[in-house]
Image (cartoon, helix red, strand yellow):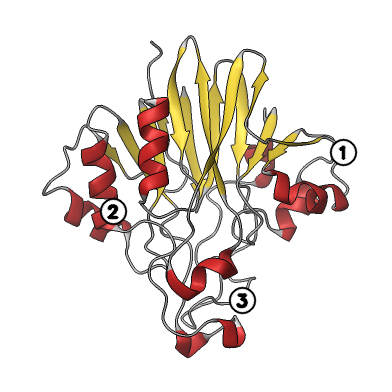
Amino acid sequence: MELQLIRNATLKINYAGSTFLIDPYFAEAGTQPSFAGKAKNPTVPLPMSTEEILKGVDYVLISHLHPDHFDEAAQAIIPKDLPIYCQPEDSETIRAADFQAVHPIEDQVDIGGIRLSKTQGQHGTGSILPLMGEVSGFVLSHKNEKTIYWCGDTIWYEGVKENIDWYQPEVIVCHAGANKFFQAHNVFGPAFTGDSEVLIMDAAQVSDLCHHAPESQVVVTHVGALDHETVTRAELRAALKKNVGSGQLFIPEDGQSLVFDQH
């Protein structure tokens, strides 16, 4: 298995002979509105061309439809006949964007010997949670590959623990920019009543995940590209090196690839 971080949550995974593109976010730097009043998003450019990103892609996985996970640029560039797998709540919206091969996953599907299972997530807590909508993660498993659990946009909570205990993944990808929304830059209106708690994991939650799954290798993404993040890669590394083994945790840079041996 080869996992390449593109930017933010966008991943390219070569797995059991197939290539999956996860949560494609193709916007050019500074072309989207700010989430926290600090800078326009994304805050950094893509590390390679979209042509290179799409080269060899067999399938697209979409966790949810927030604009930093499947934006207008990606929707315009991705071939309309490329198979897309998503949570059921998003399938009609994706079809309405003229994609011709949209496959909602209620539970799990098999793709050429690869088992693709949908998992639940919790995108924050408090008054912000109902505004975030439904989110999902996915587990990929194959007889010749390590099982990988991509958590998606979720905090560390009982549902993630249950997913780890059930699927026993050898590789876990978690989102950990500790992103927050702030009342001073309220993009939600009266439904949002104050500064939010984190929407995805922070350093302490990643530490809890690592300790819960000590035999898993953990990859941290969704950091370094948006203005409502509240932690940097360097801060995550500094906070986590104290109590998480270096052989367990990986915090790749944009464009970096990681290889995990087969069984």
Element type where label 3 sits in the image: loop
Element type where label 2 sits in the image: helix
**Which residue bears the numbered disc 1?**
100
Disc 2 to disc 3, C-alpha distance: 28 Å
**Residue at the extreme left of the image, as rendered:** 242
Disc 1 to disc 2, C-alpha distance: 38 Å
Circle 2 crowding by C-alpha within 10 Å: few under 14, some 14–19, many from 20: some
- Asked if the residue under mark 3 is in contact with the one under mark 2, i.e. CB atoms within 8 Å, the reply is no
* Residue 99 left/right relative to 149: right
Judged by depth in the image, the label closer to the viewer, 2 or 3, is: 2
* Residue 75 left/right relative to 64: right
Which is nearer the N-term, disc 2 or disc 3?
A: 3
Place of residue 152 in the rendered image (x, y in percent of width and height, measured from the top left): 50, 47
Place of residue 132 in the rendered image (x, y in percent of width and height, measured from the top left): 57, 65
**Which residue bears the numbered disc 2?**
205
**Three-letter amino acid code of the residue under disc 1:** Gln
**Three-letter amino acid code of the residue under disc 3:** Pro
- Asked if the residue under mark 3 is in contact with the one under mark 1, i.e. CB atoms within 8 Å, the reply is no
Please tell me the numbered disc located at residue 224.
none
**Three-letter amino acid code of the residue under disc 2:** Gln
Q: Identify the residue at horizontal 60%, vertical 86% (top origin).
A: 189
Circle 3 crowding by C-alpha within 10 Å: few under 14, some 14–19, many from 20: few
- 230 w.r.t. 200: above or below: below
Which is nearer the N-term, disc 1 or disc 3?
A: 3
Place of residue 49 in the rendered image (x, y in percent of width and height, measured from the top left): 63, 46
* Residue 143 left/right relative to 263: right
